[in-house]
Amino acid sequence: MPSHRPPSRRALLLRGAGLIAATAWLTPAFAQTTLRPTPSQTEGPFYPVALPADTDFDLLRTGSATYGKGQPAWIEGVVTDTRGVPVSGAVVEIWQCDQDGHYHHPGDGGKADPAFQGFGRVSVGRDGRYRFRTLKPAPYSGRTPHIHVKVRLDRHDLLTTQMYVVGDPGNARDFLWRRLNEQGQAALTRPFVAGADGLRADFPIVVQA
Ligand SMILES: [Fe+2]
């Protein structure tokens, strides 16, 4: 009796295909994307030993002081995982030298301008978005302009890297920038575009969360 025969291999395959199709239909489009993780780079010697009292998104205002040197810039983007899903709750930190090339760090002799915050930290919400108000990075001895970036989730470090400025002539001479392959250079080297309220650089961050 045909109805009692076990299903053929072909029928099973078709059922399986139907199930996969149904699953694909139900799965949000972003979950099918595969993004390349943002390349990591060395932390460098100047991560703050002690965090400043002011660690907010605006590195150009420190307490009541305003930093007036250099070119103000917004750095902004979305933190996602490799499927493109925002990493809600991730904490993004940046740190960089002032316009004269000094970090707030004992290893840099305490020469950094106190009006420049030098470090900022923001938590991202459900949309994964972050933004900082800071300087377009300035060069310092031996390095091309860069901003250090770290992403954490809970107590875990998800990524430590550096971002660079498109078109800076120092990039090609920089020992860390040169270590990146072409895709890595493209991911970490971003254009600073003039806007209504200063320069703006979009830096999307993809982590393996
Ligand atoms: Fe640095």
Image: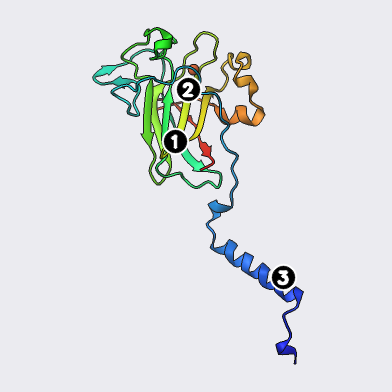
Of circles 1 and 2, the one toward us is: 1
Quarter of the view holding residue 15: bottom right
Q: Position of residue 114 (x, y in %)?
A: 31, 13
The quadrant of the image that shows the N terminus is: bottom right
Compare marks 1 and 3 and give the one earlier in the sequence.
3
Q: Decide: is 22 above or below 193.
A: below
Distance from label 2 to label 3 (Cα)?
Answer: 52 Å
**Foreground mark, 2 or 3?**
3
Mark 2 surroundings: few (<14), some (14-19) or many (≥20) residues within 10 A: many
In the image, what residue occupies the spot 39% across and 42% down? 89
Check disc 2 and give the amino acid type: Ile
Does residue 146 appear in this view? Answer: yes
Q: Badge 1: how crowded within 10 Å, few (<14), some, or many (20+)?
A: some
**161 or 186: nearer the eye?**
161
Q: Is residue 159 above or below residue 29?
A: above
The amino acid type, in three-letter code, at marker 1 is Arg
Give how far across and how far down residue 132 sits, in percent.
Answer: 39, 29
- Looking at the rendering, which quadrant does residue 94 occupy? top left
Q: Alpha-carbon neighbours of circle 3 within 10 Å: few (<14), some, or many (≥20)?
A: few
Residue type at mark 3 is Leu
In which image quadrant can residue 37 be found? Answer: top right
Q: Which mark is residue 84?
A: none
Is the residue under label 2 in contact with that under label 1 (CB below 8 Å)? Answer: no
Q: Position of residue 145 (x, y in %)?
A: 51, 16
Instruction: Report whether residue 100 is seen.
Output: no
Marks 1 and 2, how far apart at CA: 17 Å
- The residue wearing badge 3 is 13
Q: Residue at x 60, y 39 (%)?
A: 36
Q: Disc 2 on helix, strand or loop?
A: strand
Q: Earlier in the sequence, mark 1 or mark 2?
A: 2
Which residue in the structure is indicated by mark 2? 147
The tag on residue 152 is: 1
